[in-house]
């Protein structure tokens, strides 16, 4: 089978179910001005983020530049990583930023305010090789390109990789990058996941020391040097104000402990142990989200394979300082293996009906070339009469399809046009496919988008990072604040989850027909804010209160 054929799978009518017709997208790639600038780019990572501070998310696209020149057609050869400015009129403009336009094997990227100065810096995870193949330039350069850290100076990016300590020459096989504040000092730390295809794979926690300098904190955090993976998911699962995280592929789940170090609960190792059906069935992306609206964050696991099912794990609560989950994949309706690789995953409400959907970075392509993303639409709860915590979320039986399924490694969501509906940028992998900007055209319904702004704490005390990463948001109908039976949803603000994808630090809530809500926000410091009678269909910014 050819390379291209390995990732385009023809599906017989009725053999597989995919997205619901109430969720629809329109391909805006050409109207946005992205067709020609991205021609020939074969990508594997990308991120949304407001790079220039104008309130609109820009997009960074990373290429995987190590293939023969002929595979990049219509380009003459490999295409550099590109940064595009969101002009706000439906169009994106290439930004001339030589520093970030590198040849690499980029497997992840994210924008984050790592120096707490109010603008977004950029980390690019590159999957370099210690030994290069016999290839032409710039493929050889790409194969040697280590990960990069760029400081944002008023919209101009400056390479600070060498001095930062976050891109050491020993970090060869970076596959994903996430941010978290593991020590509660108000500075975002970096967690870089390395894959297993190196003699000594090592996921590294880089502690932020300030001024964009970092140090290896694995020992201080109680992490071993034997953790490998592909994707990443970060959230506070045991409600202690400190982030926990899950690394798919090795399926290692790390939970913060009272002593300040991470531990691996044996029950989670047992539950999430993976026995691949073949060498391509790899757990890849992961995401936390409240699927049944009980206030607890559940786990969805995306599989990089064509014979295994993607998995749904329901959070059953905290016991002895550790979260517990049960596998509800079958009851949730994800019973059929997807016949194409699904590396990236997000839990988002794409139709704004008030129930989170499951989105996987695969799609099908009709005879006209239309791309339809694979989204399992929520159908609510399996037992509406049961307590929320006991009810299993159900996902609609998708309509059967006929045609080729395609695979996009990275495909982060963002509301790029600020209309309250989450759009997608899907990044291609093999020749014959293209990066696509997909605008959400689902029927309009109520929504709310929440940002959080952290406040610096006293010297040596606990603080929240400026982006509010790790802040939990709960929404209720107006007048029902705190009522568990009325909860509209719970989210934790995060970026860099799933696989190879960076998102905005925004909690997006679909609200159906609700017109007013009560909001509760809890910052990692434990400080809380309650807002009542908030009108919907807007972006809400919540600032952390002082002591």
Image: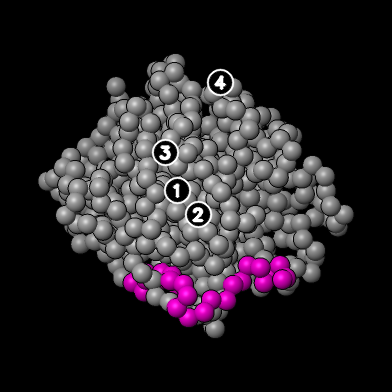
Q: CA distance from mark 4 to mark 1?
A: 26 Å
Q: Are marks 2 and 1 in contact (CB under 8 Å)?
A: yes
Residue drawn at x 63%, y 33% as measured from the top left: 226
Q: Calculate the distance from the C-alpha at mark 3 to the C-alpha at mark 1.
A: 9 Å
Quarter location, residue 219: top right
Residue behind mark 3: 235
Q: Nearer the viewer, residue 326 or 439?
A: 326
Mark 3, Cα crowd under 10 Å, few <14 / some 14-19 / many 20+, is many
The answer, for residue 484, to whether it is visible in the render is yes
Q: Closer to the N terminus: mark 3 or mark 1?
A: 3
Figure quadrant of the N terminus: bottom right
Q: Which residues are magenta?
A: 1-26
Mark 4 nearby-residue class (10 Å; few <14, some 14–19, many ≥20): few
Residue 306, label in figure? none
Image mark for residue 220: 4
Mark 2: secondary structure: strand
Residue furthest bottom in the image = 367
Distance, label 2 to label 3, CA atoms, is 17 Å
Are circles 4 and 3 on residues that touch, CB within 8 Å?
no
Position in image of residue 144 (x %, y %): 78, 45
In the rendered structure, are the residues bearing label 3 and label 1 in contact, judged by CB atoms less than 8 Å apart?
no
**Overall secondary structure of the magenta stretch?**
loop
* Residue where numbered disc 1 is placed: 287
Q: Please give the residue where the numbered disc 2 appears in the rendered image.
A: 302
Viewer-proximal residue among 123 and 278: 278
């Amino acid at each position: 089978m050819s390379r291209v054929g390995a990732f385009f799978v023809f599906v017989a009518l009725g053999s597989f179910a995919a997205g619901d017709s109430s969720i629809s997208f329109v391909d805006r790639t050409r109207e946005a001005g992205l067709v020609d600038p991205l021609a020939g780019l074969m990508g594997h990572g990308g991120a949304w983020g407001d790079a220039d501070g104008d309130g609109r998310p820009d997009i960074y696209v990373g290429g995987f530049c190590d293939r023969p020149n002929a595979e990049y057609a219509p380009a003459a050869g490999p295409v550099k990583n590109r940064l595009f400015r969101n002009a706000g009129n439906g169009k994106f403009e290439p930004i001339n930023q030589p520093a970030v336009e590198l040849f690499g094997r980029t497997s992840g990227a994210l924008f984050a305010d790592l120096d707490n100065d109010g603008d977004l810096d950029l980390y690019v995870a590159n999957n370099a090789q210690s030994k290069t193949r016999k290839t032409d330039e710039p493929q050889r350069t790409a194969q040697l390109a280590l990960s990069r850290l760029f400081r944002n100076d008023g919209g101009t990016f400056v390479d600070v990789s060498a001095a930062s300590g976050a891109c050491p020459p020993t970090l060869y096989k970076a596959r994903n990058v996430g941010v978290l504040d593991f020590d509660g000092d108000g500075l975002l730390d970096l967690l870089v996941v390395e894959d297993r295809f190196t003699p000594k794979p090592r996921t590294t926690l880089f502690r932020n020391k300030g001024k964009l300098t970092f140090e290896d904190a694995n020992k201080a955090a109680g992490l071993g040097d034997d953790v490998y993976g592909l994707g990443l998911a970060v959230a506070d699962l045991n409600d202690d104000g400190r982030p926990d995280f899950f690394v798919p592929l090795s399926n290692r789940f790390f939970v913060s402990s009272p002593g300040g170090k991470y531990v691996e609960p044996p029950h989670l190792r047992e539950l999430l142990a993976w026995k691949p059906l073949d060498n391509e069935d790899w757990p890849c992306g992961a995401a936390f989200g409240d699927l049944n609206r009980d206030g607890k964050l559940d786990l969805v696991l995306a599989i990089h394979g064509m014979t295994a099912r993607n998995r749904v794990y329901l959070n059953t609560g905290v016991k002895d300082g550790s979260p517990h989950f049960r596998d509800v994949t079958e009851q949730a309706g994800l019973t059929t293996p997807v016949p194409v690789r699904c590396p990236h995953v997000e839990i988002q409400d794409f139709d704004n009906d008030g129930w989170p959907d499951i989105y996987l970075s695969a799609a099908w392509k009709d005879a006209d070339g239309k791309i339809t993303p694979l989204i399992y639409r929520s159908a609510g709860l399996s037992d509406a009469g049961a307590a929320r915590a006991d009810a299993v979320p159900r996902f609609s039986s998708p309509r059967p399809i006929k045609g080729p399924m395609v695979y996009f490694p990275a495909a982060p969501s963002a509301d790029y046009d600020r209309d309250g509906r989450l759009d997608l940028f899907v990044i291609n992998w093999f020749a014959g496919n293209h990066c696509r900007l997909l605008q959400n055209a689902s029927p309009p319904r109520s929504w709310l988008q929440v940002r959080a702004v952290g406040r610096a704490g006293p010297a040596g005390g606990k603080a929240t990072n400026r982006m509010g990463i790790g802040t939990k948001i709960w929404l209720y109908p107006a007048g029902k604040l705190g009522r568990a039976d009325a909860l509209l949803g719970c989210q934790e603000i995060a970026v860099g989850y799933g696989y190879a994808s960076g998102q905005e630090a925004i909690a997006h809530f679909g609200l159906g027909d609700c017109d007013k809500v009560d909001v509760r926000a809890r910052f990692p410091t434990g400080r809380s804010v309650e807002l009542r009678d908030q009108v919907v269909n807007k972006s809400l910014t919540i600032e952390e209160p002082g002591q």
